[in-house]
Image: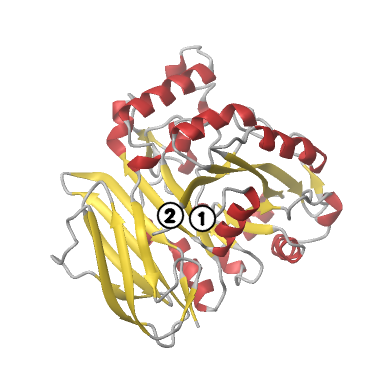
């Protein structure tokens, strides 16, 4: 976008909760994928309404050591940025009635995560509101997996996290969670969209899917968190199903959703049961898959599409422009031909490339389009690319909003 970019993964796990690797062990993998940063977000589970932390997960008392491990896992090419994935442990009937939430918390610089007394007696939404008011950065995770976002009006949170991974084949821009995002944006909330792999092992699972690309940001942990929250970022996604076939992983029903979708990858929690392991150490299998993934390609930074420019007036993603008629500048390059390009304002399409018009069918393009944004609160970009000869080869670019005033 005519500015420096830092590519990252905003949701990862380690052996502090239910990941397969220690924090420093993961860094070489993420570097190989071309990622400049990652959010380390191990599980911090709280039993409600008591406010007591789950014993086997990351504890408040672990924070200083955990943050030190993240610093030790950082270097001049890659930053490991500490946070937690806050979740509830509730009675099954309450979970079924109210839905479940997981929210990533990033403490203010130098601060720890809240201790148990902070959570006691609060419900989930009020807890997140209290965290936001106390200066914690709050990003609701797993919004693709049933988090009841209608309980939020957007004032309680800083952002939403959406995924595009090997377990998910629904068309990305048709997902209902984006409608909730538009609802919040249309109400005047400045809510950013980011993505993380939810990686419990730094292999092809972490290397595929959707990246968060922050713009015009120093290579510093606090600056990257600020950029993600402010929406100075876009999402870049690639899905090439044949890459998994090349790796020899069979397509099969996905246990995560009881077989409603198909997965090619071995989720980390199945390692002890999966017959292809044949008694081998899980880490050895991960290393083998990781090496073969890099050989087959399509998982590195250069395999993802790039949004070279999205500008409305003088504003880019996360910025503010006047609510008037504008020439919107859009430039991109992909690896498969452009299928669709849309501008969304206040939840409705205000521009879409007509069939047959350039740069549809091309793998790169630069265009300036007139768009009437008078009376609107925001405008955002949706771009899809797909290989007609291999329909499962899909790439997407999703821009955070330019806000209008």
Q: Residue at x 50, y 12 (%)?
A: 280
Which is nearer the eye, 41 or 261?
Answer: 41
User: Which residue is pictured at 37% across the width and 23% down the height?
Assistant: 292
Q: Which residue is mark 2?
A: 235
User: Is disc 1 placed on a helix, strand or loop?
Assistant: strand
Task: Give the numbered dot on residue 77.
Answer: none
Q: Which residue was labeled with disc 1?
A: 194
The number of numbered discs placed on residues in the rendered structure image is 2
Q: Position of residue 269 (x, y in %)?
A: 55, 30
145 and 317: which one is in front? 317
Q: Are marks 2 and 1 in contact (CB under 8 Å)?
A: yes
Q: Position of residue 161 (x, y in %)?
A: 53, 55
Report the residue at 73% width, 36% height from top: 68
> Is residue 165 in view?
no
Residues under labels 2 and 1: Cα distance? 7 Å
Decide: few, some or many residues near mark 1? Use Cα within 10 Å; few <14, some 14-19, many ≥20. many
User: Element at badge 2?
Assistant: strand
Q: Quadrant of residue 348?
A: bottom left
């Amino acid at each position: 976008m005519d500015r420096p970019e830092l590519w990252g993964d905003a949701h990862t796990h380690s052996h502090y909760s239910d990941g397969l690797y220690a924090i420093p062990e993961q860094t070489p993998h993420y570097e190989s994928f071309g990622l400049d940063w990652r959010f380390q977000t191990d599980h911090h589970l709280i039993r409600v309404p008591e406010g007591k932390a789950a014993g086997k997960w990351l504890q408040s008392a672990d924070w200083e050591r955990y943050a030190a491990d993240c610093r030790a896992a950082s270097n001049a090419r890659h930053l490991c940025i500490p946070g937690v994935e806050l979740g509830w442990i509730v009675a099954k009937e309450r979970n079924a009635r109210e839905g479940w939430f997981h929210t990533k918390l990033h403490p203010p610089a130098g601060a720890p995560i809240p201790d148990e007394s902070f959570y006691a007696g609060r419900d989930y939404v009020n807890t997140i509101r209290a965290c936001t008011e106390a200066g914690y950065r709050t990003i609701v995770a797993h919004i693709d997996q049933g988090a009841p976002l209608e309980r939020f009006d957007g004032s309680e949170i800083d952002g939403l996290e959406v995924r595009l991974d090997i377990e998910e084949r629904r068309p990305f821009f048709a997902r209902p969670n984006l409608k909730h995002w538009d609802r919040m944006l249309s109400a005047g909330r400045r809510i950013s969209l980011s993505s993380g792999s939810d990686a419990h092992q730094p292999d092809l699972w972490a290397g595929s899917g959707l990246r968060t690309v922050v713009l015009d940001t120093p290579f510093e942990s606090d600056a990257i968190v600020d950029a993600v929250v402010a929406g100075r970022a876009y999402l870049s996604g690639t899905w090439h199903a044949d890459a998994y076939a090349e790796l020899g992983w069979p397509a099969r029903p996905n246990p995560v959703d009881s077989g409603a979708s198909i997965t090619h990858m071995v989720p980390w929690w199945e390692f002890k049961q999966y017959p292809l392991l044949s008694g081998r150490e899980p880490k050895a299998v991960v290393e083998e898959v990781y090496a073969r993934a890099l050989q087959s390609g399509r998982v590195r930074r250069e395999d993802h599409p790039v949004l070279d420019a999205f500008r409305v007036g003088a504003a880019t993603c996360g910025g503010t422009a006047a609510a008037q008629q504008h020439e919107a500048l859009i430039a991109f390059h992909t690896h498969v031909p452009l299928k669709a390009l849309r501008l969304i304002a206040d939840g409705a399409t205000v521009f879409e490339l007509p069939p047959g018009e350039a740069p549809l069918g091309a793998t790169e393009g630069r265009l300036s389009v007139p768009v009437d944004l008078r009376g609107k609160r925001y405008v955002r970009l949706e771009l899809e690319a797909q290989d007609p000869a291999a329909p499962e080869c899909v790439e997407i670019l999703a821009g955070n909003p330019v806000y209008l005033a």
